[in-house]
Image (cartoon, rainbow, N blue to C red):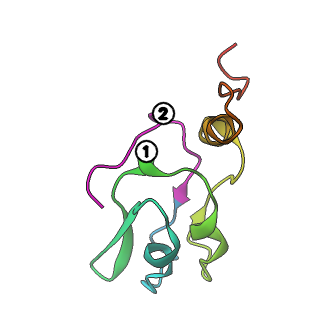
Amino acid sequence: MGSAVIYLKNVVTLEYDREKCTGCRRCLEVCPRAVFEIQDKKARIIDKDRCIECGACANNCAPEALRVDAGVGCATAIIHGLLQGTEPDCSCCE
């Protein structure tokens, strides 16, 4: 995926439980930001800061190895701000 835009560092809610992962590759297929790769027959997070908390990975993970608070936080505020032409407002920086 080349160089991915990083919106904010160390704020994403993405969590991964390697023990639950079956290596189905579904997270790779649905993630719009190429956050994952397969290593040793299991998913691995390449760069957590690429995640935009869309929830696609967690919603498609049958063994529930992934969890993310989709639609919350600074990443969502940035996306909404871009779409609406306003400044991001996640209320965490006031």
Q: Distance between the residues labelled 2 and 1?
A: 7 Å
Q: In this view, does 53 lie to the left or right of 16?
A: right
- The vertical placement of 55 against 7, above or below, is below
Quarter of the image with the C terminus in it:
top right
Image location (x, y in percent) of residue 88 = 65, 28
Residue identifier under label 1: 49
Image location (x, y in percent) of residue 50 = 43, 49
- The vertical placement of 25 against 83, above or below, is below
Q: Do the residues labelled 2 and 1 touch (CB within 8 Å)?
A: yes
Q: Which residue is drawn at 37% across and 78% down?
A: 42
Q: Which amino acid does label 2 sit on?
A: Leu
The residue furthest front is: 85
Image location (x, y in percent) of residue 60 = 62, 77
Query: Which element carries disc 2, helix, strand or loop?
Result: loop
Density class for disc 1 (Cα within 10 Å; few <14, some 14-19, many ≥20) is many
Q: Is residue 88 left or right of residue 37?
A: right
Query: Which element carries disc 1, helix, strand or loop?
Result: helix
- The vertical placement of 91 against 18, above or below, is above
Query: Residue 70 got which mark?
Result: none
Return the residue nearer the eye: 16 or 9: 9
Residue 7 magenta: yes
Q: Residue at x 36, y 51 (%)?
A: 47
Which secondary structure type mostly characterizes the magenta part of the structure? loop
Image location (x, y in percent) of residue 58 = 62, 68
Return the residue nearer the eye: 57 or 87: 87
Residue 69 magenta: no
Q: Which amino acid does label 1 sit on?
A: Asp
Q: Which of marks 2 and 1 is nearer the N terminus?
A: 2
Looking at the rendering, the stretch of residues picked out in magenta corresponds to 1-15
| Quadrant hosting residue 54 | bottom right
Density class for disc 2 (Cα within 10 Å; few <14, some 14-19, many ≥20) is some
Residue identifier under label 2: 8
